[in-house]
Amino acid sequence: MKGLLYREWYLTKKDTLILFCTLAAFWILEILVQLSKKYGNIGKYFDDDDNMLTYYVFVFIVSILIIELFISTHNIITSDYIVRWNMYSYTLPVSERKIALVKTSKIVIGTIISIVLSTLNLMFLTSMNNKTFDTDMVWLIALCAMFFGVMEAIKVPLALYFRKDSFAWGVIFTFITILMVIALIKIRNFNSSVKAETPDIDDLELSSRMFQKMMTFIHKYELCFPVLFVLIILIAYICTVKVLKRRVV
């Protein structure tokens, strides 16, 4: 099992290296900007809005890169079918359960690592900007990581069934598009209701109210999200085992 897990990471070394270099470049840029703001000349030209903008930009861009680096499975399944790895795997003394466990455990481990590293990055930015540590941001980062992990977990049995990662991503992106349309409708309705109550409200205050409403919803169901994450991962694992047992070549 350890060898299969190592194989999963080894096959993505090129994509992983590219993502790591991109992440390293953003980390270096982030450190230089924050140091220059605090001890150098950039701070003279930054007002509170600029500081807030750079804070959120670095929080989310770096977090997204970390999540992509540690969770993404890239196109391993497509490559396996091209080189007929699936046929060779049937001759190994490894059950389909273990193969499926490796694929899903990699996603779970990557999700945990990405949440930890993204939180450490948030702590660094918080200290450099003399802000109080925002637990709401930790929740948003964790939800993004869990959502991406769930999408990757769902992709595995779909890609094995269709024999192509692109088909699986097509199904997932269709689902994501539907969620985005629903979210945009909810946001539009919320903005309309707030503007009807307070016509003179500015965009900044409107965004602040929307963020508060979103965080209220997240905190209301905060215990449900990790449970839902584990449940979907478990379902994806069971589906992966069933697809592997079909032994379609």
Image (tube, rainbow, N blue to C red):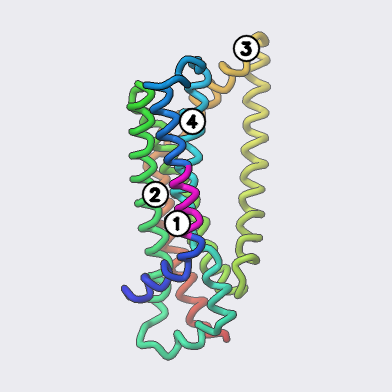
Q: Quadrant for residue 159, please give it.
A: bottom right
Q: Amino acid at mark 3?
A: Ile
Judged left or right of residue 174, residue 205 is left
Q: Evaluate if marks 3 and 4 touch, with contact meaning CB atoms under 8 Å apart.
A: no
Counting residues from the N terminus, which is met first, the one under dot 1 or under dot 2?
1
Residue 145, which numbered label? none
**Closer to the camera in the image, 151 or 23:** 23
Quadrant of image for the C terminus: bottom right
Residue range of the region highlighted in magenta in the rendering: 16-25
User: Where residue 124 appears, x then y in whole percent?
Assistant: 34, 33
- Pointer 1 residue: 71
Q: Secondary structure at mark 4?
A: helix
- Pointer 4 residue: 56
Give the residue displayed 58% in from the left and 73% down from the top.
78
- Pointer 2 residue: 114
Q: Residues within 10 Å of mark 1 (few under 14, many from 20)?
A: many
